[in-house]
């Protein structure tokens, strides 16, 4: 079953896959359950974990393994499945035959929609994580998977052969394993040499049995837990994409990026972990978005604004012409004053990009928007006197900007953002709507882009501001949002 892609659903909330890792532990956080939880989160999922074995290990090797009684494993598995709807399961270290039997029984009963099994046998350090007697017991669990992800030595054990020396042999063994166990195989080539790492998705019963993937080999010692991290990422993606090759491709792009940053973590003296969130940190930073929080806090006000009779009348074209012209006259006063404040911000900004943005916005106010007003017969130097709400709004913008650049930036933001949001919510206007041009101006993608830039500037200013100034920014933002709402209400049909 396909679920909508995260982020692709427009206004709908993003679907967060609920992914369970059934695996062993690594107290240094690079492999096993600790890596799985990071990988699931980094790939957009909600991670859960059932521990099969407690492993005293670090980046250099394994000291000892403690396996809790299988009754307790059963309790953990049932605690999750009795309460939570599980979208995907990743199975890692199983350790011994009794654990394999327990997990296989649970999988047969619960039948999670996505199951990825990483047949963990030996750690990167060379230590065994599956007793040799238990290799046979894997027969019971592997066919329950949608995908298994052996590395070169694990594939050889499953194929009953010697470890493959080259890529063709890896693919031959993967075909054999896929046919014998009736399961899809992601054969991983990380253990082979060469500047490119190969992996192959092999399904002996498929129309295209072998699909190859390749990626540049990252020159790094930080490869501890790559297998764990990859299989969890694939399980997470499979919930939303519904296509194994796409899921593997996305997981691998993320893993390659995470491998590139692993050594920066400086964890341990052996094979260190990959940096699961490096890409996210780089793209999103660590700062929370102040504007995002402010936007949430004015949710009710925004809802009241879009349902104001003035705006609903505009949207369906039933608003009286006089009312609209009266509104435009006030808006012309407003835009004059707003452009003056934006020009002040351009002079106050330290950053040349911000200076140019405010100056460009001021110019756009005076040209594009006043042209729209003129087309509607409202004079560019209106005769209608300035109304009390317009006066109050402009006074507020000036006062906020007197207090400082940060406060001024926060005060001008609602005009960008609420208009862009209103334009988006009103949707494409009907062909016969007399107010079509006005609505379309605010739906323009350039307007949305300006709103995003203004937001970015406000967030940067807030991130660097002292708490007291940040609080004043919020107050300036909220007061402007209130005045936006009152501005529309002033134009509403009596
Ligand atoms: N140096 C590297 N550069 C880029 N990709 C790599 C590198 N090492 C491993 N990979 C990729 O990481 C994934 C896991 O590969 P590998 O064959 O090492 O599995 P594994 O042995 O189970 O991992 P682990 O190191 O956790 O035991 C594969 O997709 C592989 O292509
Ligand atoms: C609990 C546990 N599970 C799996 C691995 C394999 O990971 P790697 O081969 O990268 O060390 C591990 N070391 N520990």
Image (cartoon, rainbow, N blue to C red):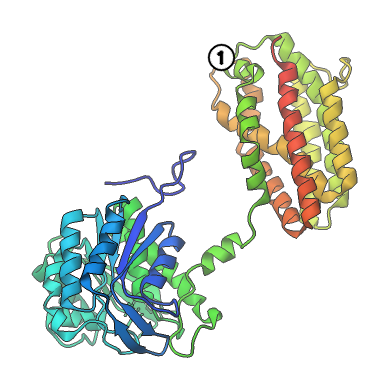
Up the image or down, 176 lies above or below 4; here it is below
Q: Quadrant of residue 488?
A: top right
- Could you tell me which residue is drawn at 76 percent across and 22 percent down? 373
| SS type, badge 1 | loop
Q: Nearer the viewer, residue 430 or 50?
A: 50
Q: Categorize mark 1 by other alpha carbons within 10 Å: few (<14), some (14-19), many (20+).
A: few
- Could you tell me which residue is drawn at 35 percent across and 51 percent down? 240
Name the side, left or right, on which 162 lies relative to 478. left
Name the side, left or right, on which 159 lies relative to 315. left
Q: Is residue 248 visible?
A: no
Indicate the quadrant of ligand 1 in the picture.
bottom left
**Residue that numbered label 1 is attached to:** 432
Q: Position of residue 238 (x, y in %)?
A: 32, 56
- Could you tell me which residue is drawn at 82 percent across and 30 percent down? 393
Name the side, left or right, on which 466 lies relative to 59. right
- Could you tell me which residue is drawn at 30 percent across and 46 percent down? 2
Q: Nearer the viewer, residue 253 or 143?
A: 143
Q: Quadrant of residue 132?
A: bottom left
Q: Is residue 147 visible?
A: yes
């Amino acid at each position: 079953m396909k679920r909508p892609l995260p982020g692709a659903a427009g206004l709908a909330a993003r679907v967060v896959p609920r992914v369970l890792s059934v695996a062993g532990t690594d107290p240094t956080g690079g492999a096993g359950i600790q890596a799985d939880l990071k990988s699931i989160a980094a790939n957009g999922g909600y991670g859960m974990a059932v521990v099969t074995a407690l492993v005293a290990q670090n980046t250099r090797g394994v000291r000892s393994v403690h396996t809790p009684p299988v009754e307790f494993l059963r309790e953990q598995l049932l605690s999750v499945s009795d309460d939570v709807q599980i979208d995907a399961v990743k199975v890692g270290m199983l350790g011994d035959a009794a654990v394999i039997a327990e997990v296989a029984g649970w999988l047969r009963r619960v039948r999670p929609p996505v199951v990825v099994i990483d047949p963990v046998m030996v750690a990167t350090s060379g230590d065994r994580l599956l007793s040799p007697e238990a290799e046979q017991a894997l027969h019971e669990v592997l066919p329950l998977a949608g995908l298994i992800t052996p590395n070169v030595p694990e594939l050889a054990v499953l194929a009953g052969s010697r470890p493959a020396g080259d890529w063709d042999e890896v693919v031959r063994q993967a075909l054999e394993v896929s046919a014998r166990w009736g399961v899809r195989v992601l054969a991983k080539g990380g253990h082979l040499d060469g500047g490119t790492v190969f992996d192959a998705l092999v399904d002996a019963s498929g129309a295209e049995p072998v699909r190859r993937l390749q990626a540049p080999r990252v020159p790094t010692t930080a490869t501890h837990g790559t297998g764990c991290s990859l299989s969890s990422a694939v399980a997470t993606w499979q919930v939303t994409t519904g296509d194994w090759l796409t899921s593997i491709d996305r997981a691998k792009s993320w893993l390659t990026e995470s491998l590139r940053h692993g050594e920066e973590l400086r964890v341990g003296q052996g094979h260190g972990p990959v940096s699961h969130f490096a890409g996210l940190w780089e793209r999103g930073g660590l700062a929370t978005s102040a504007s995002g929080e402010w936007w949430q806090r004015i949710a009710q006000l925004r809802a009241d604004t879009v349902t104001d009779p003035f705006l609903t009348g505009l949207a369906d074209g039933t608003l009286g012409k006089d009312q609209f012209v009266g509104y435009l006259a006030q808006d012309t006063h407003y835009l004059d004053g707003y452009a003056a404040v934006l020009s002040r911000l351009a002079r106050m900004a330290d950053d040349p990009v911000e200076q140019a943005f405010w100056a460009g916005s001021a110019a756009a106010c005076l040209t594009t928007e006043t042209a729209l007003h003129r087309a509607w017969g409202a004079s560019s130097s209106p005769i209608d006197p300035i109304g009390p709400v317009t006066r109050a709004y402009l006074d507020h913008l000036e006062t906020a900007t007197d207090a400082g650049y940060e406060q001024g930036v926060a005060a001008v933001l609602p005009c960008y953002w609420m208009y862009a949001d209103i334009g988006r919510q009103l949707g494409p206007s009907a062909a016969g709507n007399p107010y079509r041009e006005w609505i379309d101006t605010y739906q323009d993608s350039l307007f949305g882009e300006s709103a995003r830039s203004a937001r970015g500037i406000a967030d940067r200013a807030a991130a660097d501001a002292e708490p007291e100034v940040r609080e004043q920014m919020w107050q300036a933002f909220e007061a402007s949002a209130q005045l936006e709402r009152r501005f529309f209400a002033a134009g509403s049909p009596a």
